[in-house]
Image: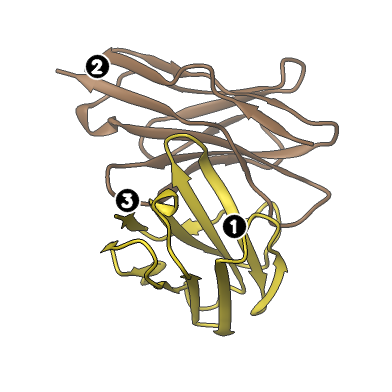
Chain colours: A brown, B yellow
Amino acid sequence: AQSVTQLDSQVPVFEEAPVELRCNYSSSVSVYLFWYVQYPNQGLQLLLKYLSGSTLVESINGFEAEFNKSQTSFHLRKPSVHISDTAEYFCAVSRMDSSYKLIFGSGTRLLVRP
Amino acid sequence: DAGVIQSPRHEVTEMGQEVTLRCKPISGHNSLFWYRQTMMRGLELLIYFNNNVPIDDSGMPEDRFSAKMPNASFSTLKIQPSEPRDSAVYFCASSSQGASNQPQHFGDGTRLSIL
């Protein structure tokens, strides 16, 4: 079975500071990796995904995540956060040899302060 | 393009009443998912449809919950009778092909409160 661990339930950070949201996963088979973001009173939106190829993937709004197979991690980073980045961030995995099922972590609330 | 549309956005009702949540997936998507989100349990997959057929309903809590997808553009999740512990945010999501490398697109959810 697969599992996803997001150790930090909340990460407070000042505006323009860098941030890292941690994600570790466990799986006996190869997986695809995703980060979703949930703004208040909205559904989840895909932020970025790792399917294959370069282990560093980027989103259009400055976030990046690096797939580290040896450490089974997919941490999310941003060099300088904005107030508007305040949201809940979910890491998720799905098996490459299966269809449809996404396993979500428990989420990390990023709170950006002025 | 319109995203996944859910209705109602909020529902408050009394224990024992029937509740029906509605979802319109993105046009062309043939996979549909119903999730429940609570503080205690996080995001739980309730049921998955592919080409209007229920494939995996192992997450449906109990017989009080039922879901249908009569056509490619509409799905319902029904709770009868409702209980206070059913209070949660219910999300519908859709994806193309139902493959594990395809992202799921979520609606804005229905916030359900059972008094």
Q: Which of A105 and B113 is in front in this view?
A: B113
Quadrant occupied by the N terminus of chain A:
top right
- Decide: few, some or many residues near mark 1? Use Cα within 10 Å; few <14, some 14-19, many ≥20: many
Q: Calculate the distance from the C-alpha at mark 1 to the C-alpha at mark 2.
A: 39 Å
* Residues at discs 2 and 3 both on one chain: yes
The kind of residue on which mark 2 rests is Glu
Numbered label attached to residue B46 = 1
Q: Which of marks 1 and 3 is in front?
A: 1
Residue A106 at x, y percent in the picture: 52, 31
B109 or B27, which lies in front?
B109
Residue visible at 44% across and 53% down in the picture: B86
Horizontal and vertical percent position of residue B70: 57, 86
Give the residue displayed 62% in from the left and 60% down from the top. B62
Which disc, if any, is residue A42? 3
In the image, are marks 1 and 3 on the same chain? Answer: no
Residue that numbered label 2 is attached to:
A16
Give the amino acid type for the residue marked by disc 3 in the picture.
Gln
Identify the subunit bearing mark 1: B
- In percent of width and height, residue A14 lies at 23, 13
B46 or B18: which is nearer to us? Answer: B18
Q: Residue at 24% of width from left, 26% of height from top?
A: A82
